[in-house]
Amino acid sequence: MVLMVVTCLWLGASAVSTATAQSLALVELEGLGDGGESWPYDINDHGVVVGSASPAAGVAHAARWDRSARITDLGAIDGRDTRAVAVNDRGTSTGYYDGSGVPRAVRWSASGTVSRLASLNGAPAASSSSIPTALAEDDTIIGYATASDTTTHAVRWDGHGRIHDLGVLPGGWESVPYGINDVGTVVGFSVAADGRPHAVRWDRADRIAELGALAGQSASWALAIGDDGVIIGRAIVGNLMTAVRWDRSGTITELRPMTGHDSGMATARNAGGTVIGASIGVPHIRAVTWDRRGRLSVLATLPGGSDDLATGINDAGAACGQATRADRQNAVRWDRRGEITMLPVPPGGAGATALGINDAGVIIGNRYRADQRPLAVLWR
């Protein structure tokens, strides 16, 4: 997880670092041939990155990059696209392949051996899709899969690859999990009998429970859970989205946006309990954090910048994301004081995005060539 703790302080353009990422250098991750594309999806605390890469012509292959940025091609399956979406500190990774137009979940061992994950019993073979969404340190994988009645159910695959149906709320027909902690508690949403998504939690015994709601709430999604049981997510009240947090008992608290803004979004939290996200208003979007008491801090923006989005934060308090200036997207880093630094990229490209940061402070993302094609990179 990646998030940070800052004081309740407005940090304006004067807090911008005068150096352009002096302590962070760009490293391009090895590809599968000249002219190809690559995308990183996750990084573990040992610096191992997973994602996908493709040659100039051909299918995308799941890929793993070691600490030296060297690529291991995890291969296609049945000649079709594969993507690795998560990796844990053991080196286990998970992702999916294109099974004749239907995605199906797989797991790769640390050595690169692939295993196809089980489908739900009774699901029609032609439509038995399954997609993983998160991976725990004990190799438990969560995701969603097609059930026998063709509805979508949240599922859990244990370390042996056995599948467990997490079910849906009474009268509902869909559920998707987004987060799992080291205790084995899973969070996500389930569409209920009213046809709306409701934030839910599943315990280790796979029992589902609906989380608390704000007054006037019409929908909610639980996105991540810490080992302390605290959950973050989003809710719709009226026509507006707001960031929310649930305590261990499932009681909800609204994380309010900046004064003058009407909506907000939570993206992640760290072990210290700080939530990172965005405050959304006219004319700009600002990257923000909320501390354990819900107090808001606004992170610095680039001089002349317009919109910012924080995508991750680590337990040391460093965060990463994107900042837009002059219609160009720039990858940026915020330190624990909220000061912003633009991450370096070669001249002549079409911008960059920062997608995640590990506890060692290594940031993964994409830089875009002049023709808009993405290349997987990291900054360290």
Image: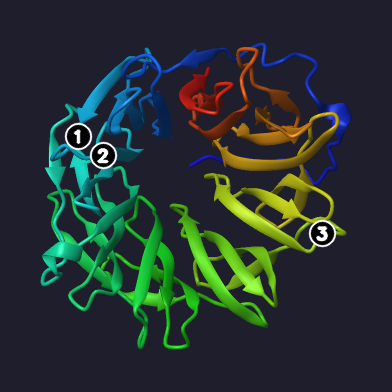
Residue at disc 1, secondary structure: loop
Q: Is residue 168 left or right of residue 265?
A: left
Three-letter residue code for mark 1: Ala
Q: Earlier in the sequence, mark 2 or mark 3?
A: 2
Residue at x 11% of width, y 72% of height? 122
Which of the 4 image quarters holds residue 252?
bottom right
Q: Is residue 373 left or right of residue 68?
A: right
Q: Would you say the residues marked 3 and 1 are in contact, meaning their CB atoms lie under 8 Å apart?
A: no
Image vertical order of residue 129 relative to residue 372, above or below? below
Residue at which label 3 appears: 261
As drawn, the label of residue 76 is: 1
The crowd level at tag 3 (other Cα within 10 Å; few <14, some 14-19, many 20+) is some
What distance separates the C-alpha of mark 3 from that of mark 1? 46 Å
Q: Earlier in the sequence, mark 3 or mark 1?
A: 1
Residue 310 in the image: x percent, y percent?
A: 64, 41
Residue at disc 2, secondary structure: loop
Residue at disc 3, secondary structure: loop
Residue at which label 2 appears: 81
Three-letter residue code for mark 2: Asp
